[in-house]
Amino acid sequence: MSNTFSSRLGFILSSAGSAIGLGCIWKFPYMATQHGGGAFFLVYLALALTLGLALMSAEMALGRASGQGVCGAFSSLGSKRWRYCGYLPVATAFVIMGFYCVVGGWSLAYVFKALAGQAVSQDAALLTERFNTLIAHPAQAILWLAGFLGLTALVVLGGVQRGIEMMSRKLMPLLFILMLLLIARGITLPGAWEGVIFLLRPDFSAFSFNTLLAALGLAFFSLSLGMGAMVTYGAYLKADSDLPGAAAWVVALTLFVCLLGGLLVVPPAFALGIGPQGGPGLTFISMPAIFASMPGGELFAVLFFVLLLVAALTSSVSLLEVCARFAIDELGLSRRMAVLASSAGIFVLGVPAALSFSPENTLSLLGHTAFDLMDQLTSNIMLPLGGIATAVFCGWFCWREIGAQLRYRNRARRSLLAATRIIVALVAPLAISVILLRGA
């Protein structure tokens, strides 16, 4: 079983799949509606193209320079003490999986709903009721969580080339094509253009440090930064591949799909009268209404939710791979046992998140359900802290090795390398720290 990607394209698609996932199609649309639309997108865009691109390049370089998972990378290029910094990204990936698999389970459930003809309607109230019924039913919530986690484990058991890369190469391009087709239909719905304007026109009256904090968290979440995924995937990248170019492609594709995700979900939501109050269920409520208004809508519904499931899997696969690689490197487990043990732990953590929407749920901490707490803890605290640790380590303690990886066949300009180091070593830690402190 090969432990490297077979090609640069396979690496880019797999990394982009890790980054794109539900962060772009599920999380970006509803966060944009809650934080001022176009203003939020501009802040997110600026953070992704500066801090995001620099940190992604550094994380990939860290993985390839060490050839190991995140803990081994910190240890081999630093010292045994630095190994402990690798525990944070692994823990972050583990906690994210706890609530991410719940949303992935919703995607899996809607595949079956679409096959049964129950996912298409122009009645916004009915669609909202169906979604709320799904997430509020305890047994169903746990069942779909287990199903999605099982699919993720099957892919990771296949290894790098036969599992992760094969899935990404074959299925990610289909997601792009279908998104474009559905956007073209969605924006022609009566009233949908108000959603396009809301998404693209900046409204800085809604800007606050909470907006900045949310955009920073989404940048890390959607780009898979601070959770060890890019370090782990970088370890599987061949030495003769153009790493800076690959990182740029991944960021560009992620930004593009975020914009597509917004155009896919937000305009139909406005057409249905849902507006900016849709929340986490926005994708599952507005999309079925598009299908109801188009010829062959039920078939498109099946295709969309299958590919939404694929997008969810490409991200969950990278997160489970981080956890499994940790178990392989640190605990000496075989890949099979590492995947099974990691999946079992994630399932236990995911059950409280899956039950968060049940009317009988009484579990809360600091006024938050388990689902919300995991989401906010990882997006607003753990991911940024992991980014700070990685930036300080790469920028100050092993830049010689990082720079060597970024100088692809000596093509990278010195000015570009110098700018990357300034962002990684100085700008990123300071900016993230300020945003965290002001948002606390």
Image (cartoon, grey):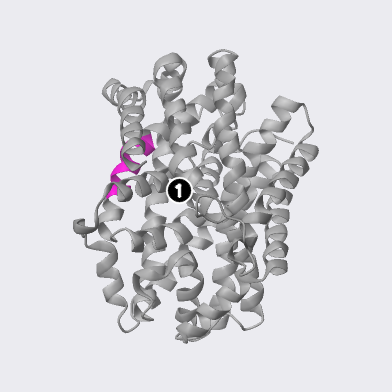
Say which residue label 1 marks. Answer: 222
Is residue 160 located in the magenta-colored stretch of the structure? no
Circle 1: is it few (<14), some (14-19), or many (20+) Cα within 10 Å?
Answer: many
Secondary structure mostly seen in magenta is: helix
Query: Is residue 245 rendered to the left or right of residue 102?
Result: left
Residue 344, placed above or below residue 262: above
Evaluate whether residue 237 shows in this view. no
Q: Nearer the viewer, residue 83 or 242?
A: 83
Query: Is residue 109 rendered to the left or right of residue 226?
Result: right
Is residue 51 located in the magenta-colored stretch of the structure? yes
> Dividing the image into 4 quarters, which one contains the N terminus?
top right
Q: Which residues are magenta?
A: 43-53
Image-quadrant location for residue 362: bottom right
Residue at position x 66%, y 52% in the image: 350
x%, y% of residue 54? 37, 32
Query: Is residue 439 rendered to the left or right of residue 140?
Result: left
Residue 170, placed above or below residue 128: above
Secondary structure at numbered mark 1: helix
Three-letter residue code for mark 1: Ser
Evaluate whether residue 405 shows in this view. yes
Q: Nearer the viewer, residue 39 or 243?
A: 39
